[in-house]
Image: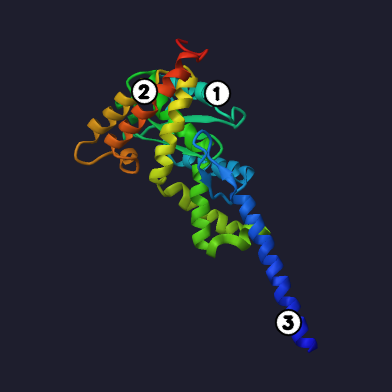
Amino acid sequence: MHVSHMAKKGFWIGKLVGLGALVLTTLASCTTAPETGRSQFILISEAQGLQLGADAYRQIKSQKKISRDRRYTEPVVRVGSRIAAISPRPNYKWEFTVFEDETPNAFALPGGKVGVHTGLFKVAKNDAQLATVLAHEVAHAIARHGEERMSSQMAVGVGVGVAGAATGINPNVLAQAATLGVVLPFSRTQESEADAIGLRYMARAGFDPRQSIPLWQNFAKYGGDRPPEFLSTHPSPGSRIQNLQRLMPQALEEYNKSPYRNR
Ligand SMILES: [Zn+2]
């Protein structure tokens, strides 16, 4: 009787702990993406994301050759900073670094760390086209797509990650998820979302959103038979342009009232 009572008590304690973990997990995942309002599953706090992004960025900067060519660094920093300033997180420690790499590509890490390849200038022919790519990357960072991606990895890695979320995440699991998070491509949903958010951000920062269409067309042209890496993980050029055209009237409205136009 006594033993079974204890067992029963244990069972209920287990239930309660389980419930607590569930509540915590729900809190942790109760996040919505900016502009689109899509609900997201994110187990990593904003502070943890900032730390992971900064660490990964430092590592990439120590491994890849950084360009000091002002023809590239000047527009990337100027255009990137203008977009970061109108974003909902102007106080992130934004960094825009140009890497010597001929592939037309760019990337974003959590917390506002952006990288641009010199090869991007083969397809981005003016400030507004460069702004298209930078706003897309800023959108990935603001919408916390990296943390979202890591969270799915953690959920797989630690069996839904409930224990991890409740007790503070095991640093090893986190490190592993972070590595995978940097390596793995974003999902199609995240890419389309970054396009949609990025289009608004570039317009708000005073860059003509209509330039996003020739930019993605240039990307498609450059691709030939083997599309560049940036395109291969992104929506097909056709559906991407259709999507942008659908969002264009609203973006143009934002562009027309932007105080930063023609700067
Ligand atoms: Zn992207």
Residue found at x 47% / y 10%: 263
Q: Is residue 263 above or below residue 158?
A: above
Give residue 160's quadrant in the image. Answer: bottom right
Disc 2: which residue? 129
Circle nearer the N terminus (3, 2):
3
* Left or right, 198 with reference to 214: right
Residue found at x 47% / y 19%: 254
Disc 3: which residue? 7
Give residue 221's quadrant in the image. Answer: top left
Q: Quadrant of the N terminus?
A: bottom right
Circle nearer the N terminus (3, 1):
3
Amino acid found under the numbered disc labelled 1: Ile
> What is the C-alpha distance between the residues marked 3 and 1?
58 Å
Circle nearer the N terminus (2, 1):
1
Q: Secondary structure at mark 1?
A: helix
Q: Secondary structure at mark 2?
A: helix
Residue 4 position in % (x across, y down): 74, 86
Disc 1: which residue? 86
> What is the C-alpha distance between the residues marked 3 and 2?
66 Å
| For discs 3 and 2, the disc positioned in front in the rendered view | 3
* In-front residue for pair 136/5: 5
Q: Is residue 3 above or below residue 215?
A: below
Q: Respond yes or no on whether mark 3 lies under 8 Å from ligand 1.
A: no
Residue found at x 40% / y 22%: 249
Q: Respond yes or no on whether mark 2 lies under 8 Å from ligand 1.
A: no
> What is the C-alpha distance between the residues marked 2 and 1?
18 Å
Residue 113 position in % (x across, y down): 52, 35
